Image (cartoon, rainbow, N blue to C red):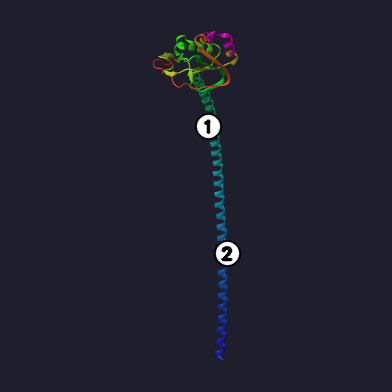
Amino acid sequence: MRQVEGSGKLKKYNKWVSIIIVCGIFGIIIGVQLNTMVSGDFTMLYKNEIETQELTELKKTTEDMKIKIANFRNRVEELEKERADESVSLKKLKSTVDEYKFLAGYLPVSGPGITIVLESNIEANIAEIVEGKRYLINLINELKVFGAEVLSINNYRIVGRTEITLAGNHININGISIAQPYIIQAIGDQNSFKQYVEHGTILFELMELDGIISNIKFSDNIKIFPLTREKPYEHIKAVDE
């Protein structure tokens, strides 16, 4: 009988121990869950705060970049405007330089005009006659009077400082020897040149008397090459106005 009573007490004791253990386990589980929930809420709040701060900083950086971009755009527009103004000045300067190059004979030109070929009607050198009686010089000067803008002799450009001289039995232009036939080309008003040939001179008649034939042709497109050689300036200098 005693064994039975002791066994019952042990069973009751084991039952209470089991209940206590189960309650403890539930308590631990509930505590862990509550701790996790509180920790999770705190982490979420902290994370949201960081994201909000990062977003604010990003917005500020974006605004700063917009301002910098606007400043750069304004600077680019200013530089483009300065460049445009500079281009206008450079264009004007280039135009002036080209004008002086044109007047000095350093640019090729073309236009309407007249071609006059002087040659002998016999097998003879006419250099001495042409230069001795100044036929070539007079012809050049008369063409200028009748509006010749640009002239050449045997494809050598004639400018204000061009020398036409007799050297032995041939003619030199700026020290370069040329041979007959002498081909004179002039760009200018064709009507004026026609008036010159028909009524403005007796030079062609005088040359014909000396055995010099003049072949004359008018053209709408005469090309004259730039100056190839000219005496250098050695003794002159610019003076301030």
Q: Which residue is mark 2?
A: 34
Q: Residue furthest right?
A: 191
Identify the amino acid type marked 1: Leu
Judging depth in this view, the residue of 220 and 30 nearest the camera is 220
**Majority secondary structure of magenta residues:** helix
Residue 229 in the figure: left or right of residue 65: left
How crowded is the residue under tag 1: few (<14 C-alpha within 10 Å), some, or many (20+)?
Answer: few
Judging depth in this view, the residue of 36 and 216 nearest the camera is 216
Q: Earlier in the sequence, mark 1 or mark 2?
A: 2
- At x 54%, y 44%, the residue is 61
Q: Do the residues under discs 1 and 2 have CB atoms within 8 angstroms?
A: no
Residue nearest the viewer, comparing 165 with 169 = 169
Q: Position of residue 140 (x, y in %)?
A: 50, 13
Q: From where the camera sits, is residue 128 visible? A: yes
Question: In this rendering, which labeled residue sits more in front, label 1 or label 2?
Answer: 1
The answer to whether any part of residue 104 appears in the image is: no
Q: Is residue 208 left or right of residue 235?
A: right
In the rendered image of this protein, does residue 37 appear above or below residue 48?
Answer: below
Span highlighted in magenta in the image? 194-206
Which circle marks residue 79 in the picture?
Answer: 1
User: How would you rate the neighbour count of disc 2 (Cα within 10 Å): few for under 14, some for 14-19, many for 20 or more?
Assistant: few
Outermost residue on the left side: it is 235
In terms of secondary structure, where does tag 1 sit?
A: helix
Is 22 within the magenta? no
In the rendered structure, which amino acid carries the disc numbered 2? Leu
Vertical comparison of 31 with 182: above or below? below
Spot the residue most to the front: 123
The Cα atoms of the two marked residues, 1 and 2, are separated by 67 Å
Compared with 61, 215 (above or below) is: above
Disc number at residue 149? Answer: none
